[in-house]
Image (tube, rainbow, N blue to C red):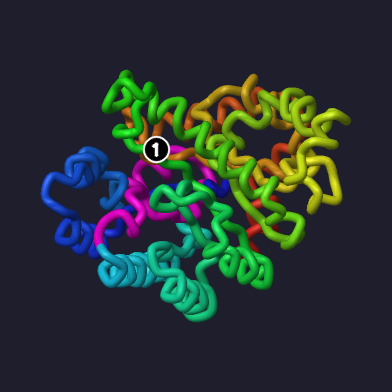
């Protein structure tokens, strides 16, 4: 068995509601229609069948519901998505190990109500949030009740990065060029979100909180020594008043995150992260279906890269299956 912990989907009924709610000129319809794996289950299952023992944990594909319309529409979209994904898990238990809740993050009161419904009634196994949240930092005070609640549920938060093309590479320009906002901007946003969570003391306040980072923790594994050098140098520690609420060196909090394998097939990249996060904090994920083969390419390459890692069979099994069951409390 292999459990893909980040398999994106746009369920059919939700897709219809999304198209109706999206403003004129919004990019999403052309993107979705070009990737039938997002909504066509027969197409998805044909690809999954090429990989023995493949199961998926469903996460709603971008855009986040809070960027589509006002809070009332976002709430409705979140409920529709959660209902339909719960139905898919119930209907296809041999395909989908679980699904992850979507929350209307532009109305935190409503988000907390929907969180309870999604987990208690629909049996979803965590929540996904996009960072930044409508250009707000992930450590904003209004989001703290979510972290407290997720620690109590003992279920994970999936952090999915986002950075729009309108965020230019340089102040003298109006848009990002050459897909820099996506290729390099998203891993940066993952790294920024992780750093805000660490340095704001969220993991100090909620030590049992479980957070899954996309794209293998962005830049963190590659820059471990730079992080340690900047934050743990004695002089820096003396000057950095913002660290007074941390009881451990900042790098130790970065080790608390879970790092998924969605870097599209790069065993050297995974081995950059592996010594840092360890076998018990790495999760198999492919980021399907966002590749030229509707998900088949990323799945194949990710599996091949894990197989090439110089690790034990036990460690490989932890990455493929055991960590997912433990972190998300999967009923398998």
Residue 58 lies within the magenta run: yes
Q: Quadrant of residue 205?
A: bottom right
In the displayed structure, does residue 288 sit left or right of residue 292?
Answer: right
Using the image, determine if residue 225 lies above or below residue 195. Answer: above
Q: Position of residue 208 (x, y in %)?
A: 74, 61
- Is 49 inside the magenta-drawn segment? yes
In this rendering, the answer to whether 139 lies above or below 297 is: below
Name the residue at 67% across, 51% down.
200
**Image-based side of 250 in relation to 136, left or right:** right
Counting from the top left corner in percent of width and height, residue 18 is at 22, 59
Say which element carries label 1. loop
Quarter of the image with the C terminus is bottom right
Q: Which residue is mark 1?
A: 163
Answer left or right for 150 relative to 57.
right
Q: Is residue 122 left or right of residue 332?
A: left
User: Which residues are the magenta region?
Assistant: 44-69
Q: In the displayed image of the protein, which residue is found farthest to the left?
A: 24
- What residue sits 53% from the left and 79% below the top? 120
Residue 254: where, in percent of width, then height? 72, 41
How crowded pointer 1 is (Cα within 10 Å; few <14, some 14-19, many 20+) is rated as many
């Amino acid at each position: 068995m292999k459990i893909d912990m980040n398999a994106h989907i746009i369920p059919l009924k939700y897709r219809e509601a999304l198209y109706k709610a999206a403003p004129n000129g919004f990019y999403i319809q052309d993107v979705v229609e070009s990737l039938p794996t997002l909504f066509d289950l027969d197409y998805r299952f044909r690809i999954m069948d090429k990989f023995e023992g493949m199961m998926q944990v469903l996460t709603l594909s971008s855009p986040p519901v809070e960027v589509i319309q006002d809070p009332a529409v976002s709430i409705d979209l979140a409920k529709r998505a959660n209902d339909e994904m719960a139905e898919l898990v119930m209907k296809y238990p041999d395909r989908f190990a679980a699904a992850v809740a979507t929350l209307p993050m532009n109305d935190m009161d409503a988000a907390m109500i929907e969180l309870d419904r999604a987990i208690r009634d629909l049996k979803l196994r965590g929540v996904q949030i996009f960072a930044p949240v409508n250009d707000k930092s992930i450590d904003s005070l209004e989001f703290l009740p979510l972290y407290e609640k997720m620690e109590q549920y003992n279920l994970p938060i999936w952090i999915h990065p986002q950075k729009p093309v309108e965020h230019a590479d340089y102040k003298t320009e109006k848009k990002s060029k050459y897909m820099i906002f996506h290729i390099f901007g998203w891993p940066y946003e993952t790294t920024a979100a992780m750093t805000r969570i660490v340095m704001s003391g969220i993991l100090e306040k909620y030590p049992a909180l479980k957070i899954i980072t996309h794209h293998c923790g962005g830049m963190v594994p590659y820059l471990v020594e730079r992080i340690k050098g900047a934050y743990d140098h004695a002089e820096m520690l003396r000057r950095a008043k913002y660290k007074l609420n941390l009881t451990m060196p900042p790098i130790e909090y970065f080790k608390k995150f879970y790092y998924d394998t969605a870097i599209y097939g790069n065993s050297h990249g995974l081995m950059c992260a592996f010594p840092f996060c360890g076998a018990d904090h790495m999760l198999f994920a492919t980021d399907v279906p966002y590749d030229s083969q509707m998900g088949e390419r990323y799945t194949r390459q990710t599996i091949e890269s894990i197989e090439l890692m110089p690790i034990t069979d036990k460690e490989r099994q932890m990455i493929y299956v055991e960590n997912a069951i433990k972190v998300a409390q999967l009923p398998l």
